[in-house]
Amino acid sequence: MRRRKKFPWIPTAMLALESNRVVALRLMRLAAGGRRARAEASRMVSEKVGEAMAAGAVLMTGGSTAKVIRRYRKRVSANARRLSSGKHQ
């Protein structure tokens, strides 16, 4: 049997904090304008649509909200690494 976590809200709080950083990094990229800003805006919209569909699929197949949050945190982490690296800026 799985042990229940003492603080099940922590992953949700961490997602909120981590997302805040990605929003700030994306805003800087968008504010700079140009080709990279357009590419980032397009990527952002397509990611959001794709992740919303994936989250719906997880939930419709009996997955938990915790699984959805784990998936979102992985994506947010990848975006933070990509946007904060010196590459593509």
Image: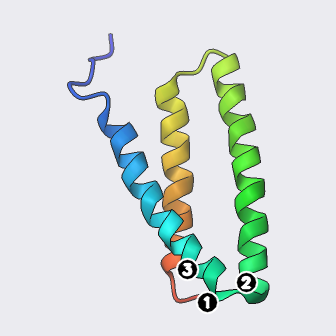
Of residue 56 and residue 25, the one placed in the foreground of this image is: 25
Q: Quadrant of the C terminus?
A: bottom right
Does residue 76 appear to the left or right of 30 in the view shown? Answer: left
Q: Of the numbered discs in the image, which one, if any, rests on residue 47?
A: none
Q: x%, y% of residue 29?
A: 61, 80
Please report the residue visible at 41 percent of the width from the left and 48 percent of the height from the top. 16
Does residue 76 appear to the left or right of 32 in the view shown? Answer: left
Please report the residue visible at 48 percent of the width from the left and 70 percent of the height from the top. 24
Instruction: Find disc 3 in the rendering and name its residue.
Output: 28
Instruction: Find disc 1 in the rendering and name its residue.
Output: 89
The 10 Å Cα crowd at callout 3, few under 14, some 14 to 19, many 20 or more, is few
Q: CA distance from mark 3 to mark 1?
A: 10 Å
**Along the polypeptide, which appears first: circle 2 or circle 3?**
3
Of badges 3 and 1, nearer the viewer stands: 3
The 10 Å Cα crowd at callout 1, few under 14, some 14 to 19, many 20 or more, is few
Instruction: Find disc 2 in the rendering and name its residue.
Output: 36
